[in-house]
Amino acid sequence: MGTVAELDAALVNLVDTTLTALAGKTATRMGSDSLRDEAIAAGAYKLQIRYAIPAQIERQSNLSYPQVEVELELHHKLADPTDERAYTITLQPLIAGSLAFASSWRDMTPVHEVDEGPGQDGPAVRVGNVVSFTVTARVELTPP
Amino acid sequence: MSSRGSIMDRLVTLAEGAVAGLSAERGQETGTKLNTEQYPHLFVFEPVERDESIEFHQVERATDVQLRFLTKAEEQEAHYLKADAIRDAIFGDPTLNGLVRTATVSLSNPQEHPGEAVIESALTVSAEVFA
């Protein structure tokens, strides 16, 4: 059976693989997935992932597929705060696009099916020198 | 150099470029100590930082700097024009040559000291950065 913990590890791996390929970097998981009270070094990435379990999908009489809603948020502190677009119109869309491939999510071991998304949820937002964007998806985990 | 010192140095440079013959300096003395040849004169002083915490352990830092511009034995209108020129030079360089994210400047009402034939204008610059 796929678990949220296994999904979490697979998503961290997906982000790191994506960032390594596109930016030559990896992302540090923040200590909290809810609070935004951690510093980020200039040019670095930090990651938060949040989950919700909205429903159990019963496809066959003896199998249920836990649905999981995923909110994956990637934060990047601009290396050059005076040139925000050097990130937001070049690298950031590439990273978001790469994370939004359903096949990448479907290939994760704990994932049975992708029900919705993945896709970027709204535009990137900036707070201070940190630019953040969120990718959301709803997946079904593999049954027991 | 300190960030506050860099901001003040930039303000001195801008003001000197805006008013011919201006004698500008960091720090403050009383106007009565100036020699006649030191007018028009500008003091750039009292940089005060105010930090406001924002997400990701960052701060939005505003540095407020006071400017005191003095002329002697000049018509009121001539003083106003020079004070305006200093204000406009600072307004025209909102990043202070890349030192800050944005800077604003305000010019207060002038004070006249008739006994000394001195007119004085105060300007306040607020320069903001994310740190």
Image (tube, rainbow, N blue to C red):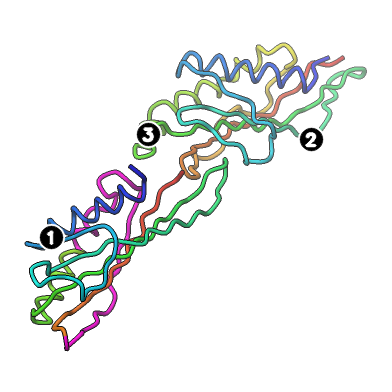
Identify the residue at horizontal 50%, vertical 14% (top origin): A20
Q: Pointer 3: what residue? A: A80
**Mark 3 vs 2, N-terminal side:** 2
Identify residue type, mark 2: Pro
**For residue A42, side relative to residue A16 (left or right):** left
Q: Residues within 10 Å of mark 1 (few under 14, many from 20)?
A: some
**For residue A82, side relative to residue B89 (left or right):** right
Considering every residue shown, the one lying at the far right of the view is: A62
Identify the residue at horizontal 53%, vertical 40% (top origin): A122
| Magenta-colored span | B88-115
Instruction: Indicate the quadrant where residue A9 lies.
Output: top right
Q: Residue A108 in the image: state x and y as whole percent.
A: 68, 13
Marks 1 and 2: which is nearer the front? 1
- Seen from the viewer's position, the closer of residues B96 and B74 is B74
> Which chain does tag 1 point to?
B
Element class at badge 2: loop
Q: Residues within 10 Å of mark 3 (few under 14, many from 20)?
A: few
- Seen from the viewer's position, the closer of residues A141 and B25 is B25
Picture disc at residue B18: 1
Q: Mark 1 vs mark 3: same chain? A: no
**For residue A41, side relative to residue B77 (left or right):** right
Instruction: Indicate the quadrant where residue B40 lies.
Output: bottom left
Marks 1 and 3: which is nearer the front? 1
Identify residue type, mark 3: Asp
> Which chain does tag 2 point to?
A
Q: Pointer 2: what residue? A: A54
